[in-house]
Amino acid sequence: MEGSALKKVRGKLIAPLGLPPTSKRPSLLKKRIYTPVHWSQYFTACEKVVVNEDGDTFQIYRRGSCGPLLVLLHGGGFSALSWALFAECIEGLVSCQILAIDMRGHGDTRTQNDENLTAETQADDIVSVVKHVFGPSPPPIVLVGHSMGGAIAVHVAAADQLPTIAGLVVIDVVEGTAMEALASMQSFLRSRPKQFHSLEQAIEWSVRSGQIRNSESARVSMPGQLSSDLTGICATSSVEVSSTTTISSILSPNDTTSVNQPLKHGECITEEEEEEGEKLESSPSSHEAVFSLPAQTDISRRSGYHWRIDLTKTEHQWPGWFHGLSAKFLAIPAAKLLLLAGIDRLDRDLTVGQMQGKFQMQVLPQCGHAVHEDVPDKVAEVVATFLVRNRLTSPSDKFSW
């Protein structure tokens, strides 16, 4: 029989297969927009960082130019674009720099072994990316991680390979609850559709199933979770830049800036503006949307999208993300914040540590597991307050206690 904590996690994580019925109430029939949005609406630069001689290449998104460096680490199956709205919100509240990373096996990052998601490997990845972008003396770093990314943020801080770590923010992951939830993860992954006909359909599913409760965030983040059936390339390449968008930070191939020199180990390569690609299909109406695996003839006849990473193949590595997490978290000397989407059960060490003031804790109820996507403004306010109280940055005119 499932414990109460496991039941709560299942309810938070597991989205139903297909769509819930459409309400017939006139007030709820207002049509939502599910058109994908380009990353440049929220970030000012997108770069590829080659970290070793094997050509392992990590996609990063940046925003801001001064203040502490917020290194944003997404959860399993998500991508750096899940931080888009949060990045915009927090840079408006405090002085900071944003570095959001597509982690190994996710988004537009490409490595020799995309299925090697051990905690040690992923922590090494983050250290390598930061050092290749900022050199041996990066600005003060605040690691911010959600779910799997929160666990990896703890491992990065515990490895003590980045000398300027000043803060740690862990979002919606607690060791005991996470370990109990592992048994439910396969059910969650099996409950998702295997394939989508269009990006609009995928975005609609993510919102109506409750995986992402904020449609604006889903429109920019869902393409980072998918790949094209025809090309195998991350679906971000299918999203067109709006004709009204100006991206001065995206450089042309002929630019002489150092980040655009020929591809070499250890350099950052700024991507060009996306060329106009294949026209996306119009968003399906509510009564037409069917999120089951299409017949093989349909797949071969049309371009669709599937999940960028098959997390089921990495199941044996999941316990390593969370085992011993509480002790590692408490031992880190930097300022710490634990932000939860519900009142999760804290183990004895965390309970005692919180009573002793070893870390700050904030609960944001009435939102899903992707709390930073569901309520990015509230998460930004909590993190901004944490940064200001710990004297890690200075507030802007928009910041208020």
Image: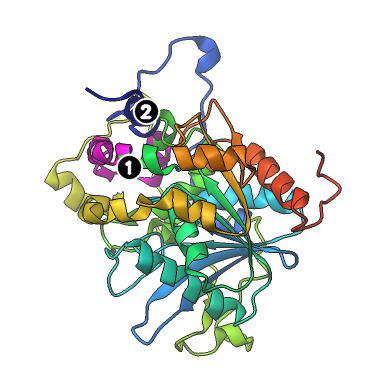
Q: Residue at x 71, y 54 (%)?
A: 91
What quarter of the picture does the C terminus occupy?
Answer: top right
* Magenta: main secondary structure: helix
Residue 120, located in which quarter of the rendered image?
bottom left
The reply to whether residue 225 is in sight is: yes
Going by the numbered disc 2, the residue's amino acid type is Ala
- Cα–Cα gap, marks 2 and 1: 11 Å
Tell me which numbered mark, 2 or 1, is placed earlier along the sequence.
2
Q: Position of residue 347 (x, y in %)?
A: 44, 37
Relative to 115, say whether 3 is above or below: above
Write the start and end of the magenta stretch as one range: 180-205
Residue 352, located in which quarter of the rendered image?
top right
Relative to 64, say whether 162 is above or below: below
Q: Is residue 359 left or right of residue 397?
A: left
Residue identifier under label 2: 5
Q: Is residue 399 left or right of residue 365?
A: right
Q: Position of residue 310 (x, y in %)?
A: 25, 53
Q: Secondary structure at mark 1?
A: helix
Q: Is residue 79 left or right of residue 71?
A: left
Q: Residue at x 66, y 55 (%)?
A: 244
Q: Residue at x 22, y 50 (%)?
A: 312
Going by the numbered disc 1, the residue's amino acid type is Met
Residue identifier under label 1: 179
What quarter of the picture does the N terminus occupy?
Answer: top left
Depth check: 101 or 84 in front? Answer: 101
